Image (cartoon, grey):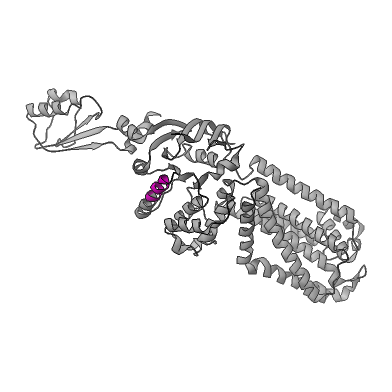
Amino acid sequence: MNWPAIRAIYLFEMARAWRTLLQSIVAPVISTSLYFVVFGAAVGHRIETIEGVPYGAFIVPGLIMLTLLTQSIANASFGIYFPRFAGTIYEILSAPISPVEIVIGYVGAAASKSILLGLIILATASLFVPLRIEHPVVMVLFLLLTAITFSLFGFVIGLWADGFEKLQLVPLLIVTPLTFLGGSFYAIDMLPPVWRALSLFNPVVYLVSGFRWSFYGRADVSLGISLAMALVFLALCLGAVTWMFRTGYRLKA
Amino acid sequence: MSSIISISGLTKVYDSGFKALDGVSLDIRQGEIFALLGPNGAGKTTLIGIVCGLVRPSGGTVRVGGHDILVDYRAARRLIGLVPQELTTDAFETVWATVSFSRGLFGLKPDPAHIERVLRDLSLWEKRDSRIMTLSGGMKRRVLIAKALAHEPRVLFLDEPTAGVDVELRQDMWRLVRRLREQGVTIILTTHYIEEAEEMADRVGVIRRGEIILVEDKAALMRKLGRKQLTLQLQAPVAALPDALARYGLVPSADGSELTYTYDSQGERTGITALLTDLAAAGLRFRDLQTSQSSLEDIFVDLVKDAR
């Protein structure tokens, strides 16, 4: 393993986050806080509780998941796309680094940033609503699994995209709607039967459900299925990245 | 002298079907400056790209320092530094950060003393804390060279290193290249400026349509393929040349005031003495004369033209 190279990529990517502190950290924290104000304080007063959990506290796992998903994808996709766009990718490709090491550097940095954000939002949420975490180990597991999986997904998008428009396409048109419809703001049981059945095709449902279980011990689907789905998606992303490096897709002619 | 790079039967066919390299075999000697010349689209950048790991070969083998670039890519790439043709830099990074990053990528521990030496050598020390986006084009070119030297490579590829840079920077780069050669670094440069190859290179290779059509010691090449010309400025213009001078193949200027004689400087007899005697016998007097030698550029143009 070329650890100095992994370290160089990791620190380079992390330095970008500190350099763009407002955009990387402050903006997501502010927008998430606004969700608490609107859904937790304003709307939440009329909903009272869902499955015995105050509405403001109920949406916290979903909001963290929303941030994890969008930020993991955004960080990782931009991280690898920008060197391709600027041409500096030549340096990565001509260095004595294996594809695995490149992925660890970029995906590790993207996942670290989104986990950090998730924890900041968790801390911010505790200022607005009473929180409890019944299964902290499972919470950390879901946090890690989701951040790594969606950073890998973002990495795939960053390799696939051949323009800034495409870079935004998947997060805006697919991931954000799936997250909003994935039970971040409601329990799946609250939906009419048809929508409830359709929701089960949404992979985000399993992540939000499993993550919420780690907080309150309540879930839309069983924990085992949630974990299995998260692992399946992780395997799919790993498969896509492996194929891309093996064929040189969008990297090597 | 032993080879540091050994290329054998290298081919590259792009997905579009375009054959960029067609069975290229080439040995680069340790410690030499090798200039790779060729018209646009000849395959220079593809060849460099394959050796450096940017392009996948379709066939053939490349060994760098005895290491196969595919099987033992880590060891091979550690030996190589690449300065690309385009000014591709991280706009928002500082000079120090980007050069240090390059060293890390090659698996080396941080060495501030080495980075300082490289930056000072390239007159970048004063700019070490500047963001790259604030630098001039010439300075950015120096940053690219600094990045390529950050891991102390034994082979340095310079792909069109002086394209678009001013004369002063070009001279600086030539000095740097010579200094690196003195330190034992092998340098392979592609260039459009033939004068650069003429000035710098120990050996010259010419590539055309994916094939190496010539590899030759620069001095030997210029001796072998170079021609000399003698130009005579006449005291009075001539309308037509006397028959006695026909065998010399003299070319008169448009106004008949000059005659040009082309000869082989390496030949046993240049024919100059006989020509001057015959000119005097024909009553043609000249007031001045000059000789000129064909440049590497002339040789290159002839080679590429002949291969068509």
Quick check: can you spot residue A146?
yes
The front one of B84 and A54 is B84
Is A180 placed left or right of A83 in the picture? right
Is B177 placed left or right of B247 in the picture? right
Is A207 placed left or right of A75 in the picture? right
Quarter of the figure with residue A60: bottom right
Locate the N terminus of chain B by quadrant: top left
The x and y percentages for residue A45 are 86, 76
For residue B177: magenta? yes
Number of labels in the image equals: 0
Locate the C terminus of chain B by quadrant: top left
Q: Main secondary structure of the magenta part?
A: helix
Quick check: can you spot residue B54?
no
* Residue drawn at point x = 26 percent, y = 28 percent: B266
The x and y percentages for residue B70 are 60, 37
The x and y percentages for residue A36 are 79, 72
* Residue drawn at point x = 9 percent, y = 36 percent: B236
* Residue drawn at point x = 33 percent, y = 35 percent: B219
The x and y percentages for residue A74 are 68, 59
Quarter of the figure with residue B137: bottom left
Is A105 placed left or right of B191 in the picture? right
The front one of B132 and B246 is B132
Is residue A201 shown above or below B19?
below
Span shown in magenta: B174-182
For residue B113: magenta? no
